[in-house]
Image: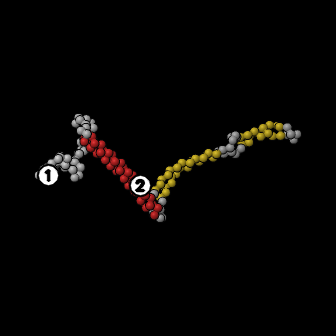
Amino acid sequence: MLTFSPFITDSHSFSKPREYLYDSPVYSDEGDILYHQQVRTGQKDNFSLNLGASLTFSMPLDKRFQERCLKNARLQGDHQQQLIDNKKLDWHIARLRECGKLRLAGIEFAKDSPYFHLCEDVVVKPKMGQVLPHRHVISSPLKVADPSSPDKN
C-alpha cells in the first residue's frame, strides 16, 4: 500500500491586547505623576507557515490476513452471482410454466404485441409416455352373452 498525504499547517500567535508601546507614568518623590513616558513592550507576533507532504509505504509482514480477505471477497462475489443466477432461473421457470398453461388453454400474445417474444420460445409437448392422439379400439372375436338374459348359452 502506498499513501501520499500533502499537508499545510500554519500558526500565528500574539498577545492581546496588542500593545507595542505603552505609557508608563514617571513619579515625583512625593508620589505625584510628573509625566508619561512611552515604553516599548517587546511584544512580537509569531507567524509560521509549513508546507510538506508525507509519503508512506507499508507492506504486511504476514500475508495470511490479506489472503483470507481476498478469499472471502471472492466467496462473497461468487455467492452474489449464484443468487443472481438463481433469480434468473426462477424467472425463466415461471415464464415457462405460465406460458405453457396459456398455450394449453389456447391463449397467446398476438404477433405484433410487444410481449409476443416472452412466450414465443415455449413449446408444449405431450407428457412423457403419453401418445397423442390417444384412442382405444376394443374389439372382441367372441360373442359375449348378457348375464341378465334368460338364454344362458
Residue holding disc 2: 76
- 86 to 65, vertically: above or below: above
Q: Residue at x 27, y 38 (%)?
A: 115
> In which quadrant of the rendered view does residue 44 lie?
top right
Q: Residue at x 75, y 39 (%)?
A: 23
* Left or right side of 37 for 114: left
Residue farthest toward the front in the current orientation of the protein: 150
Q: Position of residue 135 (x, y in %)?
A: 17, 47
**Considering only order in the chain, which callout, 1 or 2, is on the residue closer to the N terminus?**
2
- Here the colouring is secondary structure
- Disc number at residue 105? none
Please state which amino acid type lies under the numbered disc 2. Answer: Gln
Q: Which mark is residue 153?
A: 1
- Displayed quadrant of residue 71: bottom left
Mark 1 surroundings within 10 Å by alpha-carbon count, few (fewer than 14), some (14 through 19), many (20 or more): few
Residue nearest the observer in this picture, 81 or 150: 150
Check disc 1 and report its element: helix, strand or loop: loop
| 23 to the left or right of 116 | right
> Between 142 and 123, which is closer to the camera in this rendering?
142
Q: How far across and how far down the image is residue 55, in percent?
A: 49, 55
Can I make out residue 132 in this image? no
Identify the residue shown where x is 38% and y is 55%: 78
Q: Residue furthest right?
A: 30
| Rendered location of residue 121, percent (x, y) | 24, 44
Identify which residue, 87 or 67, lies in the foreground.
Answer: 87
Rendered position, 90 above or below 57: above
Residue type, label 1 = Asn
Count neighbours of disc 2 (C-alpha within 10 A) and say few if under 14, some if 14 to 19, many if 20 or more.
Answer: few
Q: Return the x and y of residue 76 as percentages of the image width and height.
A: 41, 55
Judged from the image, the secondary structure of the residue bearing numbered disc 2 is helix
Query: For the residues marked 2 and 1, what is the alpha-carbon distance in whole angstroms?
Result: 84 Å
What residue is at 58 percent from the left and 47 percent from the top? 10
